[in-house]
Image (cartoon, rainbow, N blue to C red):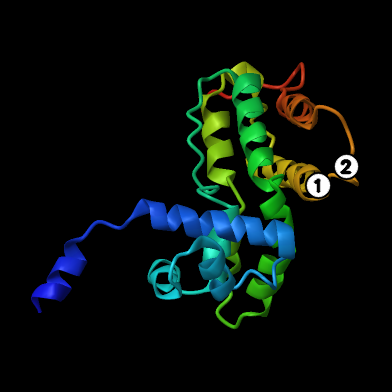
């Protein structure tokens, strides 16, 4: 039908999406995970519930995008300077996971995903993981900066634990300058031993 054809061709209103995402973040911080429903977001944002459902099939997907926007692919192009790149990477990660809405949503999202029969652990953890980006940073670093015997996945697991602790549990991990501390730890872990060969041939 002509009217349907026009709807298909009409560009999506980014303003509507931003209003809904902003309302979801506000509700998470003010009222918590369970209270952040599609109807509550619709009332807070002034966006009709049907428009929200056209963009997100469930409140879980809406909350995911509101709290972890693009976390799987942060725009951090490696420069080859290991400490600089790692610090930018850690800061970006902490900014996302340390946001009030992310802290309010994290436990509920994880519990929901684990309880869901369609739960795909690899899909979920990619939303809060930037493992490939760490590999890009290590590949761009000079051979003298990265021990070839250190497994990047082990390094990332340690990084993820530190970031989650500082980002989601700030009252427990009450240390100054967390990004700098984590970066220094990573540089020390990655540094080759004095008698270790370089990364050539990796």
Quarter location, residue 152: top right
Q: Which residue is mark 1?
A: 165
Q: Which residue is mark 2?
A: 173
Image location of residue 170, percent across then percent down: 84, 44
What residue do we see at 66% from left, 39% from top?
Answer: 95
72 over 79 or under it: above or below = below
Q: Is residue 19 left or right of residue 111?
A: left
Image location of residue 119, percent across then percent down: 58, 75
Q: For numbered disc 1, what is the local secondary structure?
A: helix
143 or 42, nearer to the observer: 42
Residue 202 visible in the shown view:
no
59 over 195 or under it: above or below = below
Q: Is residue 180 left or right of residue 63?
A: right
Quarter location, residue 190: top right
Q: Is residue 185 left or right of residue 47?
A: right
Image location of residue 55, percent across then percent down: 40, 66
């Amino acid at each position: 039908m002509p009217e349907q054809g026009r709807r298909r061709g009409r560009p999506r209103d980014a303003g509507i999406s931003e209003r809904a995402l902003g309302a979801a973040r506000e509700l998470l911080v003010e009222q918590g995970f369970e209270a952040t429903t599609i109807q509550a977001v619709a009332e807070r944002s002034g966006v009709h519930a049907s428009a929200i459902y056209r963009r997100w099939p469930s409140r879980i997907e809406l909350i995911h995008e509101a709290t972890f926007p693009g976390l799987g692919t942060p725009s951090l192009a490696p420069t080859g300077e290991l400490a600089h790149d790692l610090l930018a990477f850690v800061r970006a990660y902490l900014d996302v996971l340390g946001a009030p809405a992310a802290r309010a949503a994290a436990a509920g999202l994880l519990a929901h995903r684990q309880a869901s029969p369609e739960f795909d652990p690899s899909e979920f953890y990619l939303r809060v993981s930037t493992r490939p980006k760490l590999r890009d940073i290590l590949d761009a670093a000079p051979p003298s900066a990265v021990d070839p015997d250190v497994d990047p996945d082990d390094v990332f697991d340690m990084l993820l634990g530190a970031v989650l602790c500082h980002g989601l549990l700030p009252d427990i991990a009450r240390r100054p300058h967390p990004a700098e501390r984590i970066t220094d730890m990573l540089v020390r872990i990655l540094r080759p031993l004095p008698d270790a060969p370089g990364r050539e041939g990796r």
